[in-house]
Amino acid sequence: MKIKCISHLGIAVKELEPVKKLYGENLQLEGHHEEVVESQKVKVSFFKVGETNIELLLATSPESAVAKYIEKNGEGIHHVAFEVEDLESALEELKAAGVKLIDEKPREGAHGAKIAFIHPKATHGVLIELCQHAH
Ligand code: CMX
């Protein structure tokens, strides 16, 4: 597989507005996209950092994985997302190598990107997302 770059770092937050103020006003990063990803039960807000992004993650339901994460760990870095050239074949490769996956097939994430998660049990505690952007 070919990992092209870190697409984003996902940060779990309890409230969006004060964190947006921190990244947007205090750290002066450019906020450029916001959307609710219904399937993931999250609202996401992106800030550009050079070629990569900070993705703030707000749970939209108590059943959201992000709500569960915050309950257990508090706010903080939730996942790292690597952009790959071809997500389906990357997943096939990992599966063949015996790496435990959460998603064996791509599903839809923010920006209409195809995304899939590797299980944190297989990644020494860091939740890894692989994504392939629509463009
Ligand atoms: N980082 C590290 N470990 C994590 C973790 C995280 N973010 N989230 C869960 N885990 C650990 C748990 O602590 C648990 O460990 P133990 O078994 O030792 O207690 C284990 O992984 C399983 O966690 P769980 O919540 O019980 O299991 P689920 O199968 O219900 O969910 C997961 C696991 C990772 C899929 C889910 O928690 C999750 O975070 N999904 C991704 C949601 C998300 O970020 N969506 C936004 C996408 C938007 C986009 O980028 O486009």
Image: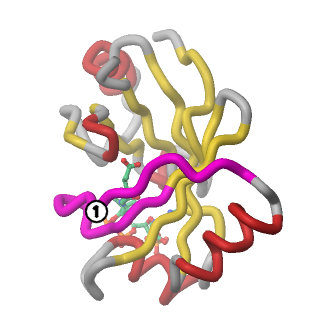
Please tell me which residue is depicted at 28% across the width and 19% down the height of the picture.
92
Question: Where does the magenta region start and end?
Answer: 29-45
Residue 19's quadrant in the figure?
bottom right
Question: Disc count in the image?
Answer: 1
Prevailing SS of the magenta stretch = strand
Asked whether the viewer can see residue 79, the reply is: no
Please tell me which residue is depicted at 57% across the width and 16% down the height of the picture.
4
Q: Residue 44: x percent and y percent? A: 42, 60
Q: Residue 72: x percent and y percent? A: 52, 85
Q: Is residue 42 magenta?
A: yes
Residue position for label 1: 36
Q: Is residue 23 left or right of residue 42?
A: right
Residues 58 and 123: in front is 58
**In the depicted structure, whether residue 95 falls above or below residue 30:** above
Please tell me which residue is depicted at 33% across the width and 40% down the height of the picture.
111
Residue 61's quadrant in the figure?
bottom left
Ligand 1 under 8 Å from disc 1 Cβ: no
Please tell me which residue is depicted at 33% across the width and 67% down the height of the picture.
42
Q: Is residue 134 left or right of residue 66?
A: left
Residue closest to the far right: 26
> Quadrant for ligand 1?
bottom left
Q: Is residue 124 left or right of residue 49?
A: left
Q: Residues within 10 Å of mark 1 (few under 14, many from 20)?
A: some
**In the depicted structure, whether residue 58 falls above or below residue 24:** below
Residues 111 and 7: in front is 111
Residues 48 and 127: in front is 48
Q: Residue 95: x percent and y percent? A: 31, 26
Instruction: Please tell me whether mark 1 sits on a helix, a strand or a loop.
Output: strand
Asked whether the viewer can see residue 112, the reply is: yes
Amino acid of disc 1? Val
